Amino acid sequence: MLVITGWGSKIAEELRELLDYPLGEDSDQEDDFFEDKIVRATYDAMPLDADRYFLCAGLLLPKTQEEMTSDDYAQTLYVNFTGPMGACEDVLANNENARMCVMGSESGFTGSYNMPYASAKRALHKYVETKALGPKQQLVCVAPGIIDDAGMTTRRTDLDVLESRRTGHPKGRFVTSLEVARLVRFLLYEDEGYITNTVIRMNGGENTR
């Protein structure tokens, strides 16, 4: 069984499609595929006996640090750090075979216009890198840069900033949700679990010069 948080995200949708999960009107229901099934979950209602987990929920508010309220801070911290960390702690304490992939961000390395978001992702990265695991457990983080077709990007209004970033990017484009989903599928289904306690940056060579 694969458990997904952030079910409505474009990355989660692409992953379900890669795994031959039906994306029709009943796609929010669990369904068989191959010998596995996919279920949706939240951080505070997490099945503990699944084989694989993809914690994909994220929140980037279109605000600077100075514009954020105390509720904004609390929500940003929960969705991007304490929620996934707590879910990982619960699962890993109860499931010796759990394989888990969580979504980080390049902002955790470089910062963001929304620094609470970047700081929460940086904390999540450090958790993944330092969490002690059992021999059959896996915990890995995928940290993409700007995702071209993700809601966090398509809902942005600073189009001039995005275009400047795109044209100045070493690849001349941003990563896509499908590319991220393919990496997640590899980590959870093709790798034997030896890739663990690491953050894989998907920045296309940006921020390396």
Image (cartoon, helix red, strand yellow):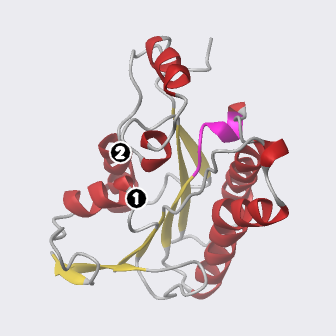
Is residue 60 visible to the viewer in this orientation of the structure?
yes
- Name the N-terminal-most of marks 2 and 1: 1
Tags 2 and 1 touching, CB below 8 Å = yes
x and y percentages locating residue 166 in the rendered image: 45, 19
Q: In which quarter of the image is the N terminus?
A: bottom left
- Residue that badge 2 annotates: 177
x and y percentages locating residue 106 in the rendered image: 60, 37
Element on which disc 1 rests: loop
**Quarter assignment of residue 143:** top right
**Image position of 45 (left or right of 23):** right
Residue occupying image coordinates x 81% and y 58% = 69
Residue occupying image coordinates x 61% and y 50% = 60
* Residue 23 on the magenta segment: no
Residue occupying image coordinates x 64% and y 51% = 61
Q: Is residue 16 above or below residue 31?
A: above
**Residue density around tag 2, few if under 14, some if 14–19, many if 20 or more, within 10 Å:** many
Residue occupying image coordinates x 79% and y 59% = 73
Specify the label residue 9 is tagged with: 1
Marks 2 and 1 sit apart, C-alpha to C-alpha, by: 9 Å
Between 155 and 29, the one nearer to me in the picture? 155
- Amino acid type of the residue that numbered disc 1 sits on in the rendered structure: Ser
Q: In which quarter of the image is the C terminus?
A: top right
**Quarter assignment of residue 171:** top left
Give the magenta range: 104-109
x and y percentages locating residue 206 in the rendered image: 55, 20
**Image position of 71 (left or right of 84):** right
- Amino acid type of the residue that numbered disc 2 sits on in the rendered structure: Ser
